[in-house]
Image: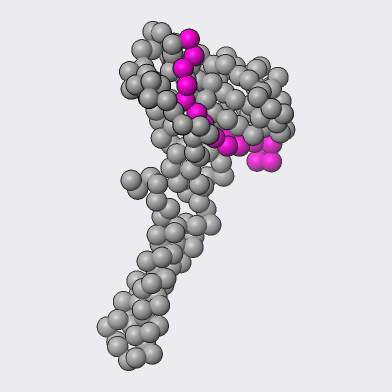
């Protein structure tokens, strides 16, 4: 549940409400509420602003997952596939992009400007195996560069993973992480 709530928005809301209460209490000479508003409200408000400034929004599914694929995920998804799915579908703080460290280790992110950006994900079935597809906007890293790194991507996200790369449209690369039969 907390994964789907923006802590920045929560801090801004609660902090703003307490700070406003403090200002109203100050104007009406209510010392107790005044202290609560100033000593709790303003720091919460500032904390909420800081979190909001460093917030990375969750990535969403680009299409609904069929029930048969959900069942397949429960039975055969690798721990790494589940971790990736859960990590990118929650608010993150202090990161520039989802999977930024992974892309750096795979040498697919030479600079922040060239880094591919995860825009969506979807789950489907390929040859009877659970597949997690990561949809990257990749205007500056070509499909050929991704293909040169395919084996390294498999080792990085493995074991039990086979990788297929595709380019459904220009400047987009889909990375399909497919479970292998021995993983299930």
Location of residue 179 (image quadrant): top left
The answer to whether any part of residue 60 appears in the image is yes
Let me know if residue 112 is in the magenta part. Answer: yes
Which residue is at 27% across, 83% downward? Answer: 32
In the rendered view, tell whether residue 149 sits above or below residue 49: above
Give coordinates of residue 54: x percent, y percent.
52, 53
Let me know if residue 46 is in the magenta part. Answer: no
Give coordinates of residue 173: x percent, y percent.
64, 26
Q: Is residue 135 left or right of residue 43?
A: right
Which residue is at 69% across, 41% downward? Answer: 113
Q: Quadrant of the C terminus?
A: top left
Which residue is at 65% across, 41% downward? Answer: 112
Direction left: furthest residue: 32
Q: Which residues are magenta?
A: 110-127
- Pick the front one: 22 or 127: 127
Q: Is residue 4 left or right of residue 49?
A: left
Give coordinates of residue 25: x percent, y percent.
34, 85
Give coordinates of residue 24: x percent, y percent.
38, 84
| Colouring of the image | one colour
Which residue is at 30% across, 88% downward? Answer: 30
Direction top: furthest residue: 182
Location of residue 128 (image quadrant): top left
The number of numbered discs placed on residues in the rendered structure image is 0
The answer to whether any part of residue 104 appears in the image is no
In the rendered view, tell whether residue 18 sits above or below residue 138: below
In the rendered view, tell whether residue 40 sits above or below residue 47: below
Location of residue 163 (image quadrant): top right
């Amino acid at each position: 549940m907390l994964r789907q709530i923006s802590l920045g928005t929560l801090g801004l809301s609660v902090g703003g409400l307490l700070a406003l209460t403090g200002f109203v209490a100050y104007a009406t000479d209510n010392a107790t509420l005044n202290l609560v508003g100033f000593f709790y409200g303003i720091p919460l408000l500032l904390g909420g602003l800081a979190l909001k400034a460093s917030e990375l929004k969750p990535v969403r599914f680009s299409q609904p997952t069929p029930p048969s694929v959900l069942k397949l995920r429960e039975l055969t998804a690798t721990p790494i596939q589940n971790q990736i799915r859960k990590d990118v579908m929650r608010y993150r703080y202090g990161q520039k992009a989802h999977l930024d460290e992974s892309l750096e280790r795979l040498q697919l992110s030479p600079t922040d400007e060239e880094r591919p950006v995860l825009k969506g994900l979807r789950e489907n079935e390929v040859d009877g195996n659970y597949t997690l597809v990561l949809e990257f906007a990749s205007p500056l890293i070509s499909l050929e560069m991704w293909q040169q790194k395919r084996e390294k991507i498999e080792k990085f996200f493995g074991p039990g993973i086979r990788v297929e790369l595709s380019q459904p449209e220009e400047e987009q690369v889909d990375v399909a992480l497919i479970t292998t039969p021995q993983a299930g």
